[in-house]
Each structure stands twice: as structure tokens, then as C-alpha cells.
Amino acid sequence: MFLHSVFILLTVIDIFLFIYFLDYVTQTVKYETVIDRVKKQTFQSMEKNFEPIKKEDLPPWEHLSFQEVTVQKSGYFQGFNEQKLVNYCAENDLYVSFLFPKGTFILEKTLCLRVYGKKEISKDQLKNISDSADFFSGQPIDRNADYGFNQLAEIALKGLSPGINDSATAVLSLHALFSLLQYKMTHELPEILFDDQKTGRIYRPTSTFLESFEKCIVPIWNYGKDDQYIQNELLAMLNQLKNLDLKRKFSALVEEWIPKI
């Protein structure tokens, strides 16, 4: 009798756990949950790695002789171990200029970076620097905030597709994108990395506010130009962004798009 009661109790607990699991899965895959998670992860990545925008000069080592390095196998350039490479360049008095921003898919044998030096650069030095670059698939937002922008834009475009036709989801993604763009108006990933002696050692191209706007917002505008809901929200967000641009750095861009809506 006791074992029978225990079995009944365990069965009831299993049923409740199964119901909880189904509810958890349902909530997790909701578009609004995914959008909120991607937005938070992107904010965290930017707050960790970005700095207030400041004018940076071109790399001061471009007058030096250099060696070029090509990609050995096609893949997504995911960045490099920043501190390790900066220290290596400082120890060997070398400078590195990457030619593509993180997240770029680079074909095999494409020129991807240049190594500059005041002396002859050895093959071992080139190999060590080449090996520092990471190439792998995936979109880790913690390593590259641009992936978060891309994912939100993809969700918006899928929401606007004829097969789904979910303008509400597209608008949620649009709101998330503009909140991220607001931060990117005043912050950016530094392009030049310095060693402990404040000497610039590495140049890495990074995406700008303008590039993120054109890559993410413009396709949504093109895809949703016949959707009045999307157009109204775009206009509202653009006007807010314009008012928040206190230094008037991007107002011309915003004003260019407002009449199109």
C-alpha cells in the first residue's frame, strides 16, 4: 500500500514537471523572449568592449615595410586573442593591421592582414601572428556585438516575410535595434590596440553606426515599405534618434531617411 502511494505521488510529480517543461519551452521559443535575450546579450557585449567614440588617427606604422598573410582555409573571421597578440607584437617590435572586421566570411587565399616591422620579419613571426586569428562557424554575440544586430534584423525580416506576415514581431526587433543603435551613436569598438607602453600595435577595422544602420535598418525599410505599421514605427524611432543625437553627428543621415517614410 505504501509503495502504491509513492508511485502515485511520483506519477503526479512527473506530470507537473512535464507541464512545467512544456511551458518553459513554449516561453523560451517565443519571438519576444528571443528578441529580448539577443538585445541584452548585445548590450552586454557592447558595454564590455566598447568605448566612447573618439577621433583615431590612421595607423602610424604604415610607412614601414610589411609582409602579407592570406587565409589558409575559408571561414568566418572571429577575431584574435587581443592581449596575447599585443604582447607578442610588443616583444618583437611588430605591428599588425587586420583588413576585415570580425564576423566577415573570408575565402581561402584572400589577403587578411599585414605585419609591419622596422626589421626583417621572420617566417616564424608571421606564422605565430597568423595562428592567432580565429576562424570558426557560429555567431557568438559575446565576442562580436555585430552578430546581435544581424540576428535582430533577420528576425524582423522573417516577421515581414509573406509566409509569416507578423508585423508585431518585426516591430519588436526594430525597437531592439534602435535601442542598440542609440548606444552605438556614442560608443564604438576601439580600432587601435595599445601595449603597456601606450604604443599602438594592432589595427582592426570595426563596424560604425552608419554601417550598422545601413545593414540592419535599410533592409527592413525596403521589405516593409508597404506596411504602414512598420513605416509608422520607423518614423517614430528615427525622430527619437534624431533628438538624442546631441552632437548632431548623424542627424543628416536620419533627416535623409525621414522623408522616405
Image (cartoon, helix red, strand yellow):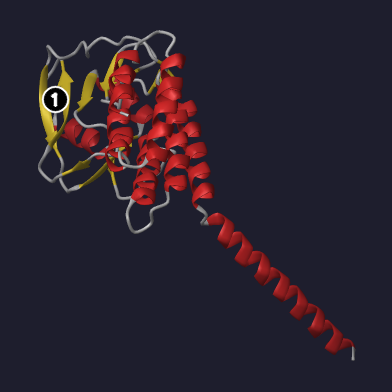
Measured from the top left, where is residue 37 in percent x and y?
52, 44
User: Of all residues shown, which one is farthest toward the bottom?
Assistant: 1
Q: Residue 81, position in %: x, y?
A: 35, 34
- Residue 257 versus residue 193: which sits nearer the camera? 257
Q: Quadrant of residue 207?
A: top left
- Relative depth, front residue between 215 and 125: 215
Using the image as rendered, state which of residue 41 and residue 114 is in the foreground. 41
Residue 255 is drawn in which quadrant?
top left
- Give residue 192's position: percent from left, percent from top: 30, 18
**148 relative position to 136: left or right:** right
Percent of width and height locating residue 76? 25, 44
Q: How many marks?
A: 1
Can you see residue 166? yes
Q: Is residue 50 something one can see in this rendering? A: no
The N terminus appears in which quarter of the rendering?
A: bottom right
Residue sitting nearer the eye, 106 or 243 = 243
Mark 1, other Cα within 10 Å: few <14 / some 14–19 / many ≥20: some
- Please indicate whether residue 260 sits to the left or right of residue 243 in the image: left
Quarter of the image with the C terminus in it = top left
Q: Secondary structure at mark 1?
A: loop
Q: Which residue lies at the image location 46% right of the left edge and 35% below the top edge? A: 175
Residue at figure coordinates x 21%, y 24% from the top left: 97
Disc 1 marks which residue?
A: 121
Q: Amino acid at mark 1?
A: Ile
From this view, report whether residue 64 is shown above or below residue 77.
Answer: above
Q: Is residue 228 left or right of residue 133?
A: right
Relative to 113, is 195 above or below? above
Left or right for 79, reference 1 = left
The residue at the point 22 percent across, 12 percent down is 58
